[in-house]
């Protein structure tokens, strides 16, 4: 096997792996977080970017991960309860497991 062919095969494999990871994570979900103080924070920015007040979540993100990102609002992940349509979201589940679909804004109650 030639060295050039090996490098091309590695590059192709890396691209496939990245595409698989994005597919597994799912499309982005826009969350409207209603915080305990009554304010609403819209979470929607480029994936992987975290800034105060904004964050984008993939549909494959876990509830625990979403809770962790709320620490920018001085909320402790272990004491936060997230609710969607009046039902609490369970930590190990992904947003899509909880029935949250990618696309338009989804209202999430934070308590």
Image: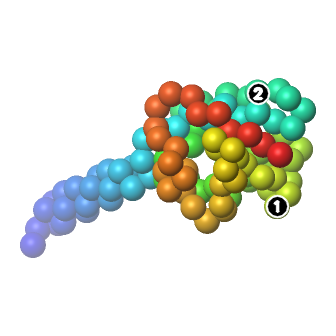
Percent across and percent down for residue 50 are 67, 39
Residue ID for mark 2: 40
At 57% from the left edge and 61% from the top edge, which residue is drawn?
A: 93
Horizontal side of 22 relative to 82 (left or right) equals: left
Percent across and percent down for residue 58 are 51, 45
Q: Quadrant of residue 86?
A: top right
Q: Earlier in the sequence, mark 1 or mark 2?
A: 2
Residue ID for mark 1: 78
- Mark 2 surroundings within 10 Å by alpha-carbon count, few (fewer than 14), some (14 through 19), many (20 or more): some
Q: Can the viewer see residue 96?
A: yes
Percent across and percent down for residue 38 are 85, 29
Q: Can the viewer see residue 65?
A: no
Task: Say above or below: 89 vs 29.
Answer: below
Horizontal side of 80 relative to 104 (left or right) equals: right
Horizontal side of 3 relative to 20 (left or right) equals: left
At 43% from the left edge and 41% from the top edge, which residue is drawn?
A: 27
Task: Say above or below: 92 vs 98.
Answer: below
Helix, strand or loop at mark 2: strand
Assess whether mark 2 and mark 1 are in contact (beta carbons under 8 angstroms): no
- Between 36 and 18, the one lying in front of the other is 36
In the image, farthest residue toward the left: 1
- Label of residue 1 in the image: none
Q: CA distance from mark 1 to mark 2?
A: 21 Å
């Amino acid at each position: 096997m030639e060295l050039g062919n090996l490098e091309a095969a590695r590059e192709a494999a890396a691209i496939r792996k990245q595409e698989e990871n994005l597919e597994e994570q799912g499309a982005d979900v826009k969350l409207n977080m209603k915080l305990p103080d009554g304010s609403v924070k819209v979470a929607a920015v480029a994936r992987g970017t975290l800034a105060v007040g904004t964050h984008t979540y993939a549909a494959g993100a876990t509830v625990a991960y979403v809770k962790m990102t709320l620490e920018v609002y001085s909320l402790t992940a272990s004491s936060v309860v997230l609710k969607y349509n009046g039902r609490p979201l369970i930590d190990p589940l992904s947003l899509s497991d909880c029935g949250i679909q990618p696309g338009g804004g989804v209202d999430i109650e934070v308590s």
